[in-house]
Image: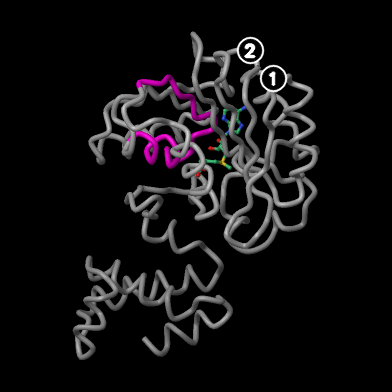
Amino acid sequence: MEIARQKLAESPSARFDAEILLAHVLESSRSFLYANPELELTHKRAEQFKKLVKRRALGQPVAYLTGSSEFWSLPLRVTPAVLIPRPETERLVETALERIPPEADWRIADLGTGSGAIALAIASERQKCEIHATDISPAAIDIARDNARQLGLGHIHFHCGSWGEPLQGKFHLVLSNPPYIDADDPHLRQGDLRFEPETALTPGPDGLDAIRQISQFAGSVLLEGGWLMLEHGWEQGTQCRETLASAGFVEIRTLRDLQGHERVTLGEKD
Ligand SMILES: C[S@@+](CC[C@H](N)C(=O)[O-])C[C@H]1O[C@@H](n2cnc3c(N)ncnc32)[C@H](O)[C@@H]1O
């Protein structure tokens, strides 16, 4: 374990990473490691652990190495075909749940679903809602569908296509955590982002492009009094509010994440 920690020294979470990888190799949990500090690894498992540590030391995200991530306390399968769900996105889920009554049978769209994180979190809390989730990536849709099956959440309809294109009918709520980083942002070439799908991170040269398209679509399919809720970059609050206003939304406001950054903007269909 000490050698693993040294190899991972460049990672800000070296000890945590090493423990997660070791627990993964042992098919157990981190608490199992603490309860069994004298445990000896078999040769096969030691080799498997060394390989994972080497890949982590090269920068590969821990979630891709273990093939799993947690969101809204739900265990999700992830591969390099999908974005690793972020804790900030739970703010979007909380905001949605504050407005969806517990027994509501709303029609809800999650655009750019990736691993299915947002759609699955809402589905796990609101059994009577009809949830539609889209993604441009067929590989992402396969993973999201698989996650829904594993979690026994059957009331989600998955569609492959661009934003709302594959959907029909009116909706009470449209949600999205779209790609919002400018294509020339140097952060895309740093840390975990280097390994995540480019289409999940950037819509192209203008980071607001997807936000504009989704706002236009939502304006045309939301029922009167329905809501659009979008996650965005911490410096995009003002532009996002302007985009929603020019798409005809009212009651527009932006909420902050736990770091105090503007993160979720919502608006009501007039
Ligand atoms: C930032 S990721 C969010 C994934 C997931 N919703 C989450 O929060 O973890 C953006 C997602 O949008 C998808 N995407 C990009 N362009 C799209 C488009 N034109 N239509 C639908 N989905 C798109 C990407 O494939 C990716 O899964």
Q: Position of residue 91 (x, y in %)?
A: 52, 48
| CB under 8 Å between discs 2 and 1 | yes
Q: Inspect the image, locate mark 2, and give the three-letter code of the amino acid beneath it.
A: Ser
Q: Which residue is disc 1 drawn over? A: 216
Q: Left or right: where does residue 203 sit relative to residue 5?
A: right
What segment is highlighted magenta in the picture?
105-123
Query: Picture coordinates of residue 172 (x, y %)?
Result: 49, 20
Q: Which residue is identified by label 2?
A: 220
Instruction: Check if residue 119 falls in the magenta segment.
Output: yes
Classed neighbour count for the residue bearing mark 1: other residues with Cα under 10 Å, few (<14), some (14–19), many (≥20):
some
Marks 2 and 1 sit apart, C-alpha to C-alpha, by 7 Å
Q: Which residue sits at x=49%, y=51%?
A: 84
Residue lying furthest top: 169
Measured along the vertical axis of the image, is residue 105 above or below residue 85?
above
Up the image or down, 213 lies above or below 114; here it is above
Q: Residues within 10 Å of mark 2 (few under 14, many from 20)?
A: some
Position of 55 with respect to 32 (left or right) is right
Name the foreground residue: 59 vs 88.
88
- Residue labelled 1 has its Cβ within 8 Å of some atom of ligand 1: no
